[in-house]
Image (cartoon, helix red, strand yellow):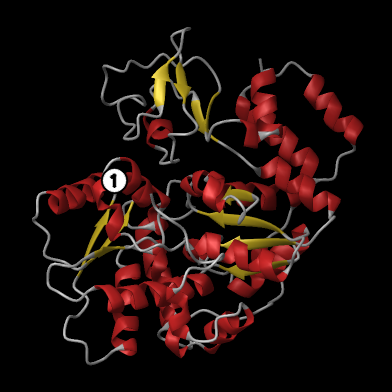
Amino acid sequence: MPSFNELYGRLVKATAQDASEEELKKIRKEDFDPHQLECLLNPEKYPLVWRVGNCNCSDDDKTSCLGRCLFDALEIDENGNVAVFDDKCVGCSECIDNCKSKKLVASKDVLPVLRELKKAESPIFAIIAPAFISQFSTQVTPGMLRSAFKALGFTGMVEVALFADVLTLKEALEFDATIQTDQDFLLTSCCCPMWIGMIRRVYHQLVPHVPGSVSPMVACGRTIKHLEKDAKVVFIGPCIAKKAEAREKDVADAVDYVLTFQEIQDVFDFTGIDPAKMEEDDRDHSSRAGRIYARTGGVSEAVKNTVRRLNPDRKIKVHARQANGVPACKEMLNDLKEGKNTSNFLEGMGCVGGCVGGPRVLIDRQVGAEHVDVYGDEAAYPTPLDNPYVIELLHRLGFETVESLLKESDIFTRRFD
């Protein structure tokens, strides 16, 4: 029987090259595994991790896929195979990377996205994570990438870094309003769904210290849909954890599909679109603060500098501690539980190096971090308070003042309970 990768490649290539429905039906009727086919055609009906063959890893082996799951999202089914609980999985990819049978793969949204682009029934926006810079070659500028997405059929490309600016401002305001003593502390809620998943599911007693903010991805998707009522939104980033976040009930209104950098590279390859050969379509809206969210320490630095701009005379300064990678995040949160904390702002990233170290990046994480810093240094504005696009956007969304971000809103607020 042909492999899963062969099935995936043939379907993506045929759909991307505008194959007829008859041609697609011919592929579907061939001798492919019907479960694999159904997963690719309708990924929303299945967990974020798919089993594409027999996986008989033992739950006694702590180095196997079963043993590496922090969230108890895997179990052995009645046939002795690994099964995935969709409601527990946060998309950390640990099971995929450590499956000794190599029979676990990440969910793929490519075919539904291509079908949406082909129908073109409503505006479709690509929103791209701050970690994108240089992922598709150092020669590819943000403007070239924007043109490449338009060539695929997207209405436009929006950098999520602009909404990282907004959330930086919101969390800086939360810090300034909340941290009044040396014992007070906040855990950032902005960026990483694995970090938030750990707090909500494993360290629930720390939830009161998490500001009620959505992620920049959710803020971006909701804003687009607020301004363009019938729009579809496709997030593109470095990990499958964002696929899990997009499915969470309280924020499921924001993003319709999530593609990884690897998935969108597949689309570029099969359509013959080379972003490096596209024309410039440059629209520079984000500040340095939003751009550096992609690497470890970026959120802390952004919030620290924005608090300083908000209230330069406040007595208690931002004293940040960062952790990257699941083991380091667990160590930091355990220290909090045991009263060993000496910081008032704590940032956690589920991947080593931050988002630039995500499991579906296309370049080395150290190289990615260096390019993110360069892109940050090129920004016209150092903080969200200096960025006129942030202020204009807030006004368009009905926020009369910066301070009004502290109030609950349908766009930027969520409850962690």
Task: From the top left corner, tell me how far across and down residue 273 is, in percent.
Answer: 72, 57
Task: Work out whether 57 lies above or below 386.
Answer: above
Q: Is residue 227 left or right of residue 50?
A: right
Say which quadrant the N terminus sits in.
top right
Task: Work out whether 102 lies above or below 141.
Answer: above
Task: Work out whether 248 lies above or below 231.
Answer: above
Task: From the top left corner, tell me how far across and down residue 380 is, in percent.
Answer: 48, 88
Give the quarter of the image for residue 100. top left
Is residue 284 shown to the viewer in this render? no
Q: Residue at x 20, y 50 (%)?
A: 333
Q: Is residue 223 left or right of residue 378?
A: right
Is residue 98 shown to the viewer in this render? yes
Task: From the top left corner, tell me how far across and down residue 400 is, in percent.
Answer: 54, 86
Would you name the residue on which mark 1 appears?
204
Q: Is residue 182 left or right of residue 294?
A: left
Report how many numbered discs are placed on residues in the image.
1
Q: Residue at x 19, y 80 (%)?
A: 317
Q: Residue furthest bottom?
A: 313
Pick whichever, 82 or 403, lies toward us: 403
Q: Residue at x 43, y 83 (%)?
A: 403
Pick whichever, 140 or 117, lies toward us: 117
Q: Identify residue type, mark 1.
A: His
Pick whichever, 363 or 408, lies toward us: 408
Task: Check disc 1 and report its element: helix, strand or loop.
Answer: helix
Task: Work out whether 221 lies above or below 394.
Answer: above
Give the quarter of the image for residue 25. top right
Mark 1 crowdedness (10 Å alpha carbons): few <14, some 14-19, many ≥20: some
Task: From the top left corner, tell me how far across and down residue 200 is, in percent.
Answer: 34, 46
Q: Residue furthest front?
A: 407
Q: Residue at x 45, y 87 (%)?
A: 381
